[in-house]
Image (cartoon, rainbow, N blue to C red):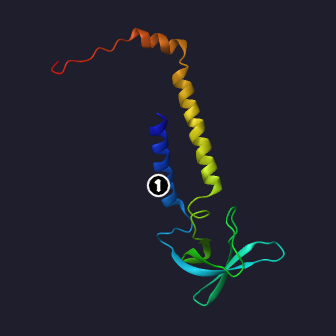
Amino acid sequence: MLKLLLSLYFTCYFCYIFYTRVPDYFDGETVMAIVKINSKTNDALANYTIASKQYQINADYPLRKLKDGESVELVYNPSKPEMAAVYSLWGYWFSWGELIMSVVLLLGLYKLATSITQNPTEQALKDQMETTDKPKKKYD
């Protein structure tokens, strides 16, 4: 049961990832940006230009270290160029909130399913003992 549950989990999670990214990778466009580290707050800001207009987004994300002057690829929405995200595996495709919530949900539902099937009620056991399933004949 656990193998089936894990394979279903990974299939659903990867389908979820491809259709929920904002800005959308498949409809969006990419542009290169230069990272600038804010000396006061130590935040990484990505500066990019689209149609000779300057934009800036926050490029910080846990477990992602960017250096001052580093060039990064951004995904942005062509109709709203100010809506952009750093295109990386960690932070764009996979994020902490989604991973933690999905694992907690997976473990909770697994625990619920095993507790229900391993500890049936007295009435359920009685009903199960009373019913007899006889295999049907092929040409009955």
- Extreme residue toward the bottom, this view: 52
Give the residue at x 54% y 25%.
116
Give the residue at x 49% y 48%.
10
Picture quarter with the C terminus: top left
Q: How many discs appear?
A: 1
Q: Residue 136 versus residue 72: which sits nearer the camera?
A: 72
The residue under label 1 is 15
Q: Residue 105 versus residue 1: which sits nearer the camera?
A: 1
The answer to whether residue 11 is above or below residue 114 is below
Give the residue at x 57% y 26%.
115
The answer to whether residue 92 is above or below residue 33 is above
- Extreme residue toward the right, this view: 40
Q: Residue 61 versus residue 137: which sits nearer the camera?
A: 61
The answer to whether residue 65 is above or below residue 34 is above
Residue 124 image position (x, y, % from top left): 49, 15
Residue 5 image position (x, y, % from top left): 48, 39
Residue 96 image position (x, y, % from top left): 65, 55
Amino acid type at circle 1 is Cys
Give the residue at x 58% y 81%.
32
Q: What element carries label 1?
A: helix
The answer to whether residue 114 is above or below residue 67 is above
Residue 22's quadrant in the figure?
A: bottom right
Q: Alpha-carbon neighbours of circle 1 within 10 Å: few (<14), some, or many (≥20)?
A: few
Residue 70's quadrant in the figure?
A: bottom right
Residue 72 image position (x, y, % from top left): 61, 77
- Extreme residue toward the left, this view: 139
The reply, left or right, for residue 95 in relation to residue 127 is right
